[in-house]
Amino acid sequence: MEIKPIKKVLIANRGEIAVRIIRSCREMGIHTVAVFSDADRTAMHVRYAGEAFHIGPSPSNESYLKMEKILEVAKQCGADAIHPGYGFLSENAEFSRRCQEEGIIFIGPSPEAILGMGDKITARRTMIKAGVPVVPGTSEAVSSEEEALETIRQIGLPVMIKASAGGGGKGMRLVKEESKILSSLRGARSEAKTAFGNDAVYIEKYIDSPHHIEFQILADRLGNTVHLFERECSVQRRHQKVVEETPSPIMNPEVRARMGADAVAAAKAANYEGAGTIEFIMDDNLNYYFLEMNTRLQVEHPITERVVGVDLVREQIRIAEGNPLPFTQDDLHQNGHAIECRVYAEDTDNNFMPNPGTITHITEPLGFGVRCDGYVYEGYTIPIYYDPMISKLIVWGKTREEAIERMRRSLYEYKISGVKTSIKFLERIMEAPAFRKGGYNTHFIEDNIKFLMAEPECAFECEDLALIAAYVEYTTSLREIEQTMSPVSSHAGKEWKDYGRRIATRRI
């Protein structure tokens, strides 16, 4: 098979994932091209790439979702390939097809694979044919309300009504009572139509105490397919992942081997090429079922990279060039434990509302086993137009216990001022007995919300907040202080610190 070396990659994305892709490209000696909207003129990915091109106004449907504009820029700058990252056009089969037509390498799967796995009903049928276990439910879209009622009576409550297209928790309803079936069906259809332009839904049996387990896979054009083990993704809020870890604390070697084999079989059944993820749902008895396939790089891919020792973006690019996988399944092993926390600019005390604004100070954690994939910097204004995730904090330890303690330390060191963030909420997750025990499921946040939202008892955390508040007050009143104290006085720093410690004795 012909190998076509990639020399220039256009990254059709923004934020931390664009920066992360650029890093691997730099290490491979590949020139990079960024694209940006009005809101991202000063974004880090624009400053870090070799070239940057404006593609439109701030809203994503006028910029990052404009495939023809992105293709125009790719041809203008002479890019060999386009990396879509995740989100935006990453799972758009039409975009993959248009890249093919323009002679540009799409660093991802074929349009046929995206279509086949992007439609959840088609994916269920494919998995059943491949012998991969699926959750009991319909294998066709529900055609009428009468059919939905009859199907649910046969399956038995509770059930999940799910949109056939898309993901991210949209077009999804949990039904526990028969009186709620029709309203839930209508709500799911309406939301799916709005979000994906397709109101088709299907029905699955709801698994009590569900655990969300996913397997990373890589597949080349020669048919070689491997899995890079599992990620535990059960810490979720509104069906969105908040914390991920690998290995899964509930997994055992026998089940891991079976699930890995099924993940590979699923990828082969889809004629898949590139990096992808097979998602499963598991019950407390370790029975598991196929959930869906994500035909792209996952947000949480860094924890797999850290434990398995494989740069997934590098492998995506090598596969897109036509190279065979450089390893077999027997070459891959898990080493230690990794955890990822997603840091959002949001007000956790106000129903997790997004909190865009200007970063006035940022101190990222450092030290052994710590990685921070972010894109914000001091003076940067977080736009209102995009997802509020601003970074991913990844840590590694020899054991799960070591990784948890390293994450606690790293979150404590992570300081961001100017906007509210979820850092303190993530700290509470690391401290929660249910998380530390390891047997948690997707109800973890809901079941532990009182603990997670409680004010910190640690005096050091209160003192830290007080010191920041005191420093801000001190600097804003600097002119008054200058009347009685030299600006370079060695006592200046001591004065606001002492004031902060006095504040720390009060309730913050």
Image (cartoon, grey):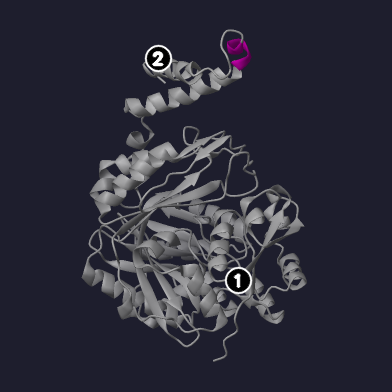
Q: Over which residues does the magenta segment extend? A: 478-482
Q: Nearer the viewer, residue 176 or 237?
A: 237
Say which amino acid is labelled 2. Arg
Q: Nearer the viewer, residue 342 or 20?
A: 20
Which of the image's four quarters has the C terminus? top left
Q: Nearer the viewer, residue 284 or 480?
A: 480
Q: Is residue 140 visible?
A: no
Residue 502 is marked as 2
Residue 199 is marked as none
Left or right of 170? Residue 236 is left
Task: Measure the alpha-carbon separation of dots 2 and 1.
Answer: 54 Å
Residue at x 55% of width, y 35% of height? 361
Q: Which residue is mark 1?
A: 30
Q: Secondary structure at mark 1?
A: loop
Kindly report the secondary structure that dominates the magenta region of the rendered protein: helix
Residue at x 22% of width, y 69% of height? 253
Q: Nearer the viewer, residue 98 or 391?
A: 391
